[in-house]
């Protein structure tokens, strides 16, 4: 229904535009009997509706023909995509890295004949969200208020994804992101009433997947005692603030559901005066070694040590 409505609206707009171009102020429009109404042809690629419908729409409009004319003018549909990412190079995913890739992707679509430039064009609107949730939300609202947005590419930082993804179902525009590592983003989103409806994660892993791997390793070697040592903002370059905190929270939730595993967690911010070596010596060496005759397994989430 929505796509049909957009097609009809586009048709009416181009009809009026064509009439205004071919009619001078001292002339009247040709009588209806001299005009032939063109047909509307819409070709939609077979992508999962509705999340990728607008991206796959290829529209062909045959405009009204003036008697004596031999060809119909056809204007391409413009897909307006909002690209909301950090601009600073210190982050893993940035505007400067992504924009050239988008240009290559569009050229590839045309070169392979998947889309035709005469039918569909793309306009990418950049916004720097600084990997901050409020900036991401502000960027989304600004783009929506100032013009049509058919698709959101980003944010990638988890807190920014959370805020923008809650709004896209009201804006009727899908959001594609390589971020969204928190478990909530991996839940079933097919129901329009779900919190993150129209959110599409393109990444291969999330925090829950990593937690499942950790649990598999623990079970494989019969390790039952775990100490989690983390810097709450560690590895912020990947998904923004509290990346390691969110990862640790996912592990803790999983351990809670497994009675055979005993765990403890230590936030490095509790002893900021000590470096990692000293904290490991204090927490592992004196407190968590040989618990009930078993050596505790320590897992560290810290920017300089591990990658999520």
Image (cartoon, grey):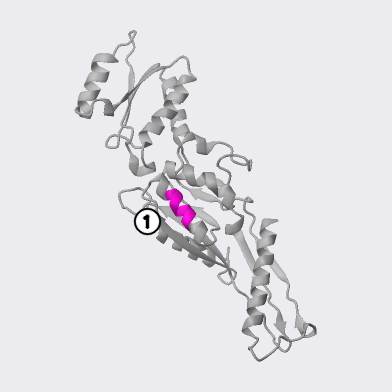
Residue placed at 62% from the left, 64% from the top?
Answer: 58
Q: Is 140 inside the magenta-drawn segment? A: yes
Furthest residue in direction top, as rendered: 292
Residue placed at 50% from the left, 61% from the top?
Answer: 146
Callout 1 secondary element: helix
Q: Is 252 inside the magenta-drawn segment? A: no
The reply to whether residue 99 is in sight is yes
Instruction: Give residue 74's position: percent from left, percent from top.
Output: 63, 75
User: Which of 103/160 is in front?
Assistant: 160
Secondary structure predominantly adopted by residues drawn in magenta: helix
Instruction: Give residue 87's position: percent from left, percent from top.
Output: 35, 54
Against 85, residue 31 (above or below) is below
Furthest residue in direction right, as rendered: 33
Against 98, residue 13 (above or below) is below
Side of 141 where 35 appears, left or right: right
Count of numbered marks: 1
Span colored in magenta: 136-142
The reply to whether residue 201 is in sight is no
Quadrant housing residue 37 = bottom right
Side of 130 where 34 appears, left or right: right
Quarter of the rendering occupied by the C terminus: top left
């Amino acid at each position: 229904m929505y796509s049909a409505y957009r097609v009809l609206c586009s048709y009416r707009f181009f009809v009026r535009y064509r009439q205004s171009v071919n009619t001078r102020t001292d002339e009247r429009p040709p009588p209806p009997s001299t005009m032939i109404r063109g047909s509307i042809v819409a070709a939609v690629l077979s992508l999962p509706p509705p999340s990728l419908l607008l991206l796959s729409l290829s529209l062909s409009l045959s405009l009204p023909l003036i008697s004596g004319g031999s060809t119909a003018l056809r204007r391409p549909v413009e897909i307006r995509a909002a690209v909301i990412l950090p601009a600073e190079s210190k982050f893993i995913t940035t505007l400067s890295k992504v924009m050239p890739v988008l240009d290559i992707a569009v050229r590839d679509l045309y070169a392979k004949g998947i889309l035709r430039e005469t039918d569909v064009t793309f306009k990418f609107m950049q916004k720097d969200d600084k990997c901050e949730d409020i900036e991401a939300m502000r960027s989304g609202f600004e783009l929506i208020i100032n013009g049509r947005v058919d698709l959101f590419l980003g944010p990638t930082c988890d807190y920014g994804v959370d805020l923008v993804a809650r709004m896209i179902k009201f804006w009727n525009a899908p959001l594609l992101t390589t971020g969204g590592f928190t478990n909530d983003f991996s839940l079933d989103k097919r129901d329009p009433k779900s919190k993150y409806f129209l959110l599409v994660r393109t990444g291969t892993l999330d925090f829950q997947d990593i937690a499942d791997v950790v649990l598999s390793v623990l079970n494989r070697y019969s390790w039952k005692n775990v100490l989690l040592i983390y810097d709450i903002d560690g590895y912020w370059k990947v998904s923004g603030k509290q990346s390691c905190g969110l990862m640790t929270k996912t592990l803790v939730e999983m351990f809670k559901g497994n009675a055979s595993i005993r765990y403890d967690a230590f936030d490095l911010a509790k002893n900021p005066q000590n470096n990692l070596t000293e904290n490991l010596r204090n927490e592992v060496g004196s407190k968590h070694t040989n618990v009930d005759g078993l050596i505790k397994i320590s897992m560290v989430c810290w920017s300089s040590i591990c990658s999520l």
